[in-house]
Amino acid sequence: MKKGAFVAVLFATLIGLSGFDFRQHSIPLEEIRSGGPPKDGIPAILDPRFLAAPEAHFLEDGDLIIGVVQEGMAKAYPLRILVWHEVVNDRLGAQPIAVTY
């Protein structure tokens, strides 16, 4: 495939898949690369399991967490796990929550 044909196919694909109009681009289309995993390429955690803090031996004292507290209930989501999954779909009591990183 010639370079011009490749650019035309890439252009049509970008508009078709993303909905964005790339006709007034400032970067040559053939230089645009993927920025990471495809859509749904990073699985969310759908059924998180929790440990009592003294049992979480995989965590170190300085590890960061995202903490959620609501109506007297608290949960901790370690960034050590969130960097690999980015989203946790969970519940606090009957309330559904999404924790994102």
Image: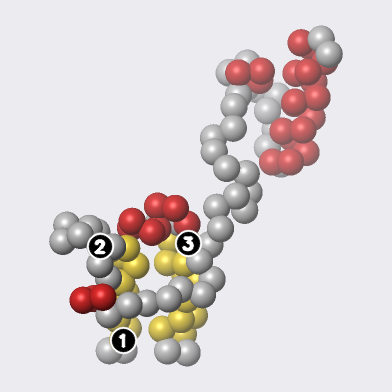
Q: Is residue 72 left or right of residue 24?
A: left
Point out the tag, 3 or 2, that comes first from the N-terminus: 2
Q: Is residue 69 left or right of residue 81?
A: left
Point out the tag, 3 or 1, that comes first from the N-terminus: 1
Comparing 94 with 42, the one in front is 42
> Which label number is shown at residue 87?
3
Query: What amino acid is found at the position of numbered circle 2 in the picture?
Result: Leu
**x, y percentage for residue 27?**
58, 18
**Disc 3 vs disc 2: which is toward the camera?**
2
**x, y percentage for residue 64?**
24, 59
**Disc 2 vs disc 1: which is toward the camera?**
2
Mark 3 to mark 2 CA distance (whole Å): 19 Å
Residue at x-position 50% and y-position 66%: 45
Query: What amino acid is found at the position of numbered circle 1 in the picture?
Result: Met
Point out the tag, 2 or 1, that comes first from the N-terminus: 2
Rendered-image quadrant of the C terminus: bottom left
Mark 2 to mark 1 CA distance (whole Å): 21 Å
Q: Are marks 2 and 1 in contact (CB under 8 Å)?
A: no
Q: How is the image coloured?
A: secondary structure
Q: Regarding mark 1 in the picture, which secondary structure is present there?
A: strand
**x, y percentage for residue 42?**
55, 52
Residue at numbered disc 1: 73
| Mark 3 burial class by Cα count in 10 Å: few <14, some 14-19, many 20+ | some
**x, y percentage for residue 93?**
42, 89
Residue at numbered disc 2: 59
For the question of whether residue 69 can be seen, the reply is: no
